[in-house]
Amino acid sequence: MDKVYIFDTTLRDGEQSPGASMAIEQKLEVAKLLANIGVDIIEAGFPISSPKQFEGVKRIAESVEGPTIAGLARTLEKDITTCYEAIKPAAKKRIHTFIATSDIHMTHKLKKSRDEVLKLATEAVALAKSMVEDVEFSAEDATRSKWEFLRDVYTAAIDAGATTINIPDTVGYTVPDEYAELVKYLLKNVPGIENVIISVHCHNDLGLATANTLRALITGARQAEVSVNGIGERAGNASFEEVVMSLKTRKDIFNLNSDIKTEYIHHLSKIIVNFTGIPVQPNKAIVGENAFAHEAGIHQDGIIKHRMTYEIMTPQSIGRQKSLLVLGRHSGKHGLKERLNELGYVLKDESFKKIYERFLELADKKKGIFDEDLHALVEEELKILPQIFSLVYFSVMTGNKLIPTATVKLKKKSKVYQEAATGDGPVDAVYQAIEKITDTPIKLISYAINAVTHGKDAMGGVTISVERNNKIYRGYGVATDVIEASAHALLNAINRILYNSMEIE
Ligand code: KIV
Ligand code: ZN
């Protein structure tokens, strides 16, 4: 089976996404993860473009072992020498030089003739070759360039010493069959092409970046330029995880291998979201939140009976724990029972029947049913969690010029306790008062609010997790008033702490 070289450009083209810039320490961390996951080439940045870019590439070259470290350079002497200085410390280094070859770019952007572009490309590759053995040449906007001119430019680049020739679909314009035809044309017409690696670099303007990349690989390209989560200029680049998992999942079609340890993909994706602040859409292939989530009852039933009825790869193969059966109004009894079992509840038929009825009522009101809801349903039904403290009354005074102050009354057995407290906001003030009465200080770890029903009078559901004595406890509360829902959520968590038998780590 042939190997596909994975050239990751998350730190270069990916970082060119609006607002995606990363700190140098973060880039270093990403580069180490890329090395660990088995990437062959890391394009660490564009050294001439700023001192920070230079520093980032240099630091990666100094400390990341394993992959080849590449830097980007235009066909200018200063770009190439600066790139070389940045990548110099790497054990394996590559200069990636590029110039546009389409008429539209040459006329309007570069204001250069074909001959001038050809000369610049040749000289740049030769200069890079005098510094490093490994030189990549890209004809920017290749897919909108005249094929005969591309043939001439790539021929000259190979003659001058390029070891990889890249065919960028810079503006995401091509379609799979056309791209394949271009690769075939170059394979047939560029002398010496059999001695170099053909690389593909696809942008996603028409949503075809992964498809184009894969089609070119089938046709003979052996390097895929990709970015994690598909981030990059405009609509982004071909996505690392989509290309790699397609090769792995459809080996029967591609008969190609990559060295990627796919079980680290999920973690890598999360880190990129974290560092760049660019979220992944929930239905994104492979790494989206819902990529392994099933809601329809028929699907859940199928998954429970045999996972491969609705999943073509395992969540574990990309490092996720397990498929998620999202409970909602489409879930059947089977799905609910399975989830309750996973949560540790083995229920008698009678209890399950009642919980199922309550579950259906809740599913009509709420978009998705989460574990907290199920805990609450079971606790209520089985009277597992006694109401040690319950809310009798609360009032809050708040405003933009007032210190939020809450008065809370709680009942324990038949006795009513009252406290007042101030806080950073109305919820905090109520929480301070509750903590005083129950004598149970906690650290709030997370607080999430969502509308349980629709409209202006929607019920608000508050889910919190709190820490006490190094243990995490969850709480859930519902009310039309979000402060009241917050109070119920904290009381739910505190009752759990006090009862201390439903702890979860
Ligand atoms: O999209 C593009 O053409 C590029 C080149 C620099 C390879 O990113
Ligand atoms: Zn690009």
Image (cartoon, rainbow, N blue to C red):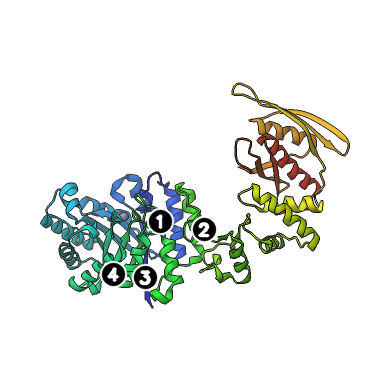
Q: Which of 274 and 178 is in front in this view?
A: 178
Residue, disc 4: 197
Three-letter code for the amino acid on which mark 4 is drawn:
Ile
Numbered label attached to residue 373? none
| Other residues around mark 2 within 10 Å, as few (<14) / some (14–19) / many (≥20) | some
Q: Quadrant of ligand 1?
A: bottom left
Badge 2 marks a residue whose secondary structure is helix
Q: Residues within 10 Å of mark 1 (few under 14, many from 20)?
A: many
Q: Earlier in the sequence, mark 4 or mark 1?
A: 4
For this orientation, the residue located farthest to the right is 414
Q: Quadrant of residue 355?
A: bottom right
Check disc 3: other Cα within 10 Å, few if <14, some if 14-19, many if 20+: many
Dot 4 falls on a residue whose secondary structure is strand
Question: Where is residue 351 drawn, in percent x and y?
Answer: 79, 58
Mark 4 or mark 3: whose residue is earlier in sequence: 3
Q: Name the amino acid, label 3.
A: Val
Residue holding disc 1: 230
The answer to whether one can see residue 276 in this image is yes
- The residue that mark 2 highlights is 267
Please report whichever mark, 2 or 4, sits nearer to the chain's N-terminal start.
4
Q: Name the residue under label 3.
A: 4
* Spatial separation of the CA atoms under disc 1 and disc 3: 18 Å
